[in-house]
Amino acid sequence: MTSPHKKTVGVLLAAAVLAAVSVLAVAGAGGAFNRGSWRGRTSCAVPALPGVVLDATLVNMGGPMMQGAGGSMSGGMMRLSLDRNTVAAGQVSFLAINAGSVNHELVVLPLPIGQVVGTRAIGADAKIDETGSIGEASSTCGEGSGQGIAPGASSWVTVTLAPGRYEVVCNLAGHYAAGMYAQLTVT
Ligand SMILES: [Cu+2]
């Protein structure tokens, strides 16, 4: 008289397998969607990047028409968002994608103990002090430092991060104050 019990177990197992498969399918589709959508939004041929790859999306409100009206300084609210806020120590590649309408950049700074992101002093040049920068991606369709990432383009940089807290920012004039900073915790 074990068959009803076995049948129940079988049904439960099948349900569990189906659930697991659907979770994997959703996760896979989500990952492909995220990768595809952002990669699809950059006009650059991005090489395979070493280590853990973090996607950083750089945006500003307002369309291209705002540039003509007021220039990059009046881009309105701006954001720099990372696709994850925690990463393991070691080699990390940042892929900065400019999904906005004005130039942007990505700079990695250590975040001192007790300091909150977005609270750095802003100088007369409308920028923060970049002393101690660990890495920068500001080259249109290229690696490392440059003249800024053009709209639709991307830039990348690979760094080695020790455990701790970091602040990832865009330090073009006015952009930090407009909201372009994000915290990254390295464990
Ligand atoms: Cu910016």
Image: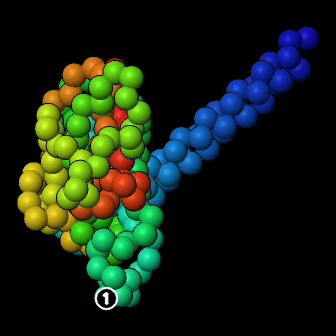
Residue 67 visible in the current orientation = yes
Residue 96 visible in this rendered orientation of the protein? no
What residue does disc 1 label?
Answer: 68
**At x 56% / y 48%, what residue is drawn?**
26
Viewer-proximal residue, 158 or 147? 147
**Residue drawn at 41 percent across, 81 percent down:** 63
Report helix, strand or loop for mark 1: helix
Location of the C terminus (image quadrant): top left
Q: Nearest the camera: 56 or 62?
A: 62
Query: Where residue 164 appears, x then y in whole percent?
Result: 30, 22
Q: Point out the residue furthest to the front here.
A: 124
Relative to residue 22, is residue 88 drawn left or right? Answer: left
Is the residue indicated by label 1 positioned so its CB lies within 8 Å of ligand 1?
no
Image spot of residue 178 (x, y percent): 39, 59
Which residue shows up at 15% across the image and 58% down it? 138
Using the image, determine if residue 78 lies above or below residue 1.
below
Q: Three-letter amino acid code at disc 1?
A: Gly
Q: Is residue 108 left or right of residue 86?
A: left
Which quadrant: the N terminus? top right
Please report the residue visible at 89 percent of the width from the left and 20 percent of the height from the top.
Answer: 4
* Depth check, front residue: 81 or 3: 81
Query: Which of the 4 image quadrants contains residue 7?
Result: top right
Q: Is residue 171 left or right of residue 20?
A: left
How many numbered marks does the figure carry?
Answer: 1
Apparent side of residue 27 relative to residue 44 in the rendered image (left or right): right
Q: Residues within 10 Å of mark 1 (few under 14, many from 20)?
A: few
- What colouring does the structure picture have? rainbow
